[in-house]
Amino acid sequence: MKKERLITRRGAIVAGVAAVGGFVVARRFPKILPPTCGNVLRAGDSFTYGAQRALLGQSLVREYAASDVTSFPATGTTDPGVKMKSELGEAYRRMQAGAFAEWRLSVEGSVARPRAFSLAELKQFSPRTQITRHTCEEGWTAIAQWTGVPLSAVLDAVGILPTARFVVYSAYDDWIDSIDLLDALHPQTILAYGMNGRDLPLAHGAPVRLRVERQMGYKSMKYLRRLVVTDRFEDGGEKGNIQTGWAWYTGI
Ligand SMILES: Nc1nc2c(c(=O)[nH]1)N[C@H]1C(S)=C(S)[C@@H](COP(=O)(O)O)O[C@H]1N2
Ligand SMILES: [Mo]
């Protein structure tokens, strides 16, 4: 079906929102201030978060044509099995050796039906493919095509509770981060298992990475391991952005 192409921004928003239940969404999106706004170190977040949500609402980022795809550097962790001298690294190495058949994405927290999804199970959802521009805080951008399952569909499948507000996600290299439900339910926020028409390469986050298209590249976590739906803002403690000195909200 080519229908998706014809829908307006507003239509996409309504469709995305309807998938989860409008009554819940109305209660969840009243925020203009980011949850980090009480923290003086994070005062900059308040401006971009407030401005973007007020001006852009749930708008889609630009999607490009296949001819716009560029080369794409791999940064940060490029193999948790090599980088991590820990149980996580060991677990990742084992899964990689088995072509990720044993990999599971645990989805838990404020959900009615916590569940661990295999890669094959994620591939059973209707896929979304999008060609978008990635912006790294180090100053480079690159365009790639990503294929995956909308995070909203997975959250719908586990049944997020009416109290849910954030999704905290962590990876096999021990990264942790979070987004609010506005970004989590955004139609272009996907759990990507494909890049440029092939399986997601190891260096780019195999088997599954997040794409959070309306924020800077570091929110698009590679090597996903676990999603926890929370009722309150959670930054991941010591490993979270506030402690590590990164902005929690970095809209582009
Ligand atoms: N787990 C994990 N996710 C990560 C990173 C990382 O080091 N570990 N680096 C982040 C940063 S800063 C960027 S710019 C992108 C890089 O993705 P790429 O390696 O596919 O270019 O992934 C982001 N997600
Ligand atoms: Mo980055």
Image (cartoon, grey):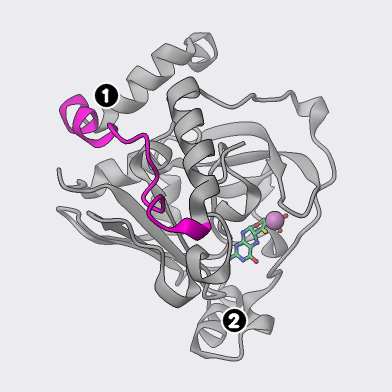
Q: Which residue is labeled 2 in the image? A: 93
Check disc 2 and give the amino acid type: Arg
Q: Say which residue appears at 27% left-offset and 47% top-offset.
A: 165
Q: Give the structural element (helix, strand or loop) at label 2.
A: helix
Q: Say which residue appears at 40% left-offset and 63% top-offset.
A: 235
Give above or below for 143 relative to 232: above
Q: Residues within 10 Å of mark 2 (few under 14, many from 20)?
A: some
Q: Say which residue appears at 50% left-offset and 55% top-offset.
A: 42
**Where does the image place residue 191, in percent across and percent down from the top left?**
49, 48
Viewer can see residue 248: no
What's the distance in space between the residues labelled 1 and 2, CA to CA? Answer: 40 Å
Quarter holding the C terminus is top right
Check disc 1 and give the amino acid type: Ala
Q: Residue furthest right?
A: 71
Q: Is residue 110 left or right of residue 38?
A: left
- Span of residues in magenta: 22-41
Q: Which residue is labeled 1 in the image? A: 18
